[in-house]
Amino acid sequence: MSERYQPIDMAETGPRAVRTAFANQVAYCRANDARVTARIVAALATLLDAPASDFARRIADWKGAPLADALPLRAAGGVHALHLSGAAHELAPIYADAEDINDPAVLAGVVRRHDAALLPWLDGPPQTNEAGRSSNFIAAMLWLADRGLPPRFECLEIGSSAGINLMIDRYHYDLGGVHVGPNPGAIAFAPDWRGNHPPMHRVDIASLKGCDVAPVDLNDPAQALRLKAYIWPEHAVRFARIEAAIAEAGKRKPDLIRANAADFVETELARPQAAGTTRVLMHSIVWQYVPADQQVRVTAAMEAAAARATADRPIAWIALEANRTVHHHELVVRYWPGGGDPRTLAHAHAHGAWIEWLG
């Protein structure tokens, strides 16, 4: 397996695309401090040359676009779930990052014995909800307020998964010394801040509403376990955050509905917008999973809303998405009226460990 990221069309299909997707995922994991997940993905890739299970055969013969479908992460999530549930004890040394382990042999045995349990993990996209990414949303709102937009935000999120980032008004943020939110908050975030601190402003969250094609109910233990399976095991702090989010959702569920991105955005943007409120579309590590036709509809809906925007009722678009060429994420913001051109405000760690502020 090469550790170098190979350029590939997100829509490419076929055996070559499958193998490239796995190679790229290994490189991406290593670049984001996920050595164990990289080991799992690399070992799974070795099963594709001579598939000996329905699980491996389905991956090798994948009909869709494996990179856009996040196929390696679907497979790795299933393996991690076996480990978390205690169903495959032989995985423990790999997840402990022990040396001198024959990873391919271990994975081959696990897949052979748990073929039926693993197959359903290939049926849908991974749920990679991560509260740490919300620091980027808050930093962007501070920047928007500094540009003169009303600092009262009506937030719309697509790809909300379990709605963890629909509770950002309950969290506390220390962004390079700029504090936002209730203290101590249900979860406290203090990412390693690089560069100048963001502007200092009061941020008021008027509302938070999101959608997902397969929303996760944090109050359902089985669904919560599924969400945990997609957390990279190297990042212990993320497990603490998910437990805190589960507890918070038990107090008051996030406002989350089942809908695709395009239907949701079109419907919500058509609703009246209160004066003195900035309406924000936000998403993190989601755009690559949105089908191309829906991307077109979301963009068209935002452009139509932008044409109606006024200084008293502005609209903004905050996106934290992966740049797989440089192996990090970019916080890109647009706003209307006046700032329709994309502005890259920061580079960021995949799960919120650090933010390099450019704004």
Image (cartoon, helix red, strand yellow):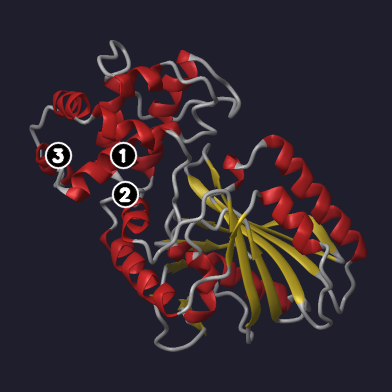
- Gap in angstroms between the C-alphas marked 3 and 2: 14 Å
- Gap in angstroms between the C-alphas marked 2 and 1: 7 Å
Q: What is the secondary structure assignment of the residue under circle 2?
A: helix
Q: Which of 116 and 151 is in front in this view?
A: 116
Q: Which of 206 and 97 is in front in this view?
A: 206
**Mark 2 near mark 1, Cβ–Cβ under 8 Å?**
yes
Picture coordinates of residue 27 (x, y %)?
38, 35
Look at the image and tell me whether residue 27 can be seen: no
Picture coordinates of residue 137 (x, y %)?
58, 67
- Residue 88 marker: 3
Look at the image and tell me whether residue 251 can be seen: yes
Judging by the rendered image, the residue that carries numbered circle 1 is 78
Q: Is 248 positioned to the left or the right of 94 in the image?
A: right
**Amino acid type, residue under disc 3 in the picture:** Ala
Q: Which residue is rendered at x = 54% and y = 24% of the image?
A: 64
Q: Answer with the quarter of the image where residue 78 lies.
A: top left
Q: Is 7 positioned to the left or the right of 126 in the image?
A: right
Of callouts 3 and 2, which one flags the residue occurring earlier in the amino acid sequence?
Answer: 3
Of callouts 3 and 1, which one flags the residue occurring earlier in the amino acid sequence?
Answer: 1
Of callouts 2 and 1, which one flags the residue occurring earlier in the amino acid sequence?
Answer: 1
**Amino acid type, residue under disc 1 in the picture:** Gly
Judging by the rendered image, the residue that carries numbered circle 2 is 229
Mark 1 crowd level (few <14, some 14–19, many ≥20, 10 Å Cα)? many
Q: Which residue is rendered at x = 45% and y = 49% of the image?
A: 127
Q: Answer with the quarter of the image where residue 250 lies.
A: bottom left
